[in-house]
Amino acid sequence: MNSAYDVIVRPIVSERSYDLMEQGKYTFEVAKSACKEEIADAVEKIFNVHVVKVNTMNVRGKMKRVRYQSGMTRSWKKAVVTVADGESIEIFATQAAE
């Protein structure tokens, strides 16, 4: 990958991801070609935290239908990043407080 911002696409904001934040786990959508080492380096570089563990999963697209046309939603890759104890990612912390 070229830069850390090419690896991390966006944070995932859902009820489950907010529950995982209490355990120090943060969820991101990442590039499909990114490996765990690249994801860990990108999170450490962007958010200045120490990454302990990275879990990844490929999310398959779902079948959708609009009237008579059927198609599929896009497939993407999700990463759950565990940071060291006592550290947090500030972007999520300010949103959770509000």
Image (cartoon, rainbow, N blue to C red):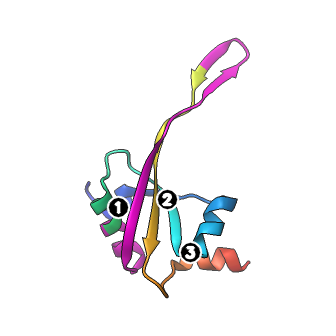
**Kind of element beneath mark 3:** loop
To which residue does mark 1 refer? 39
Alpha-carbon span between mark 2 and mark 1: 10 Å
Alpha-carbon span between mark 2 and mark 3: 15 Å
Horizontal arrangement in the rendering, residue 18 relative to residue 42 (left or right): right
Quadrant of the drawing holding the N terminus: bottom left
Tag 2 near tag 1, CB within 8 Å: yes
**Kind of element beneath mark 1:** helix
Disc 2 residue type (three-letter): Phe
To which residue does mark 3 refer? 23
Neighbours of disc 2 within 10 Å: few (<14), some (14-19), many (20+): many
**Rendering coords of residue 71 (x, y %):** 58, 21
Tell which circle, 2 or 3, labels the residue nearer the N-terminal end. Answer: 3
Q: Which residue is drawn at 66% across and 74% down?
A: 95
Q: Residue at x 52, y 61 (%)?
A: 27
Q: Is residue 57 magenta?
A: yes
Tell which circle, 2 or 1, labels the residue nearer the N-terminal end. Answer: 2
Disc 1 residue type (three-letter): Ile
Alpha-carbon span between mark 3 and mark 1: 19 Å
**Rendering coords of residue 63 (x, y %):** 61, 25
To which residue does mark 2 refer? 28
Quadrant of the drawing holding the C terminus: bottom right
- Front in this rendered view, residue 82 or 28: 82
Neighbours of disc 1 within 10 Å: few (<14), some (14-19), many (20+): many
Q: In this view, does 56 lie above or below 70?
A: below
Q: Give the range drawn in magenta.
A: 41-70
Disc 3 residue type (three-letter): Gln
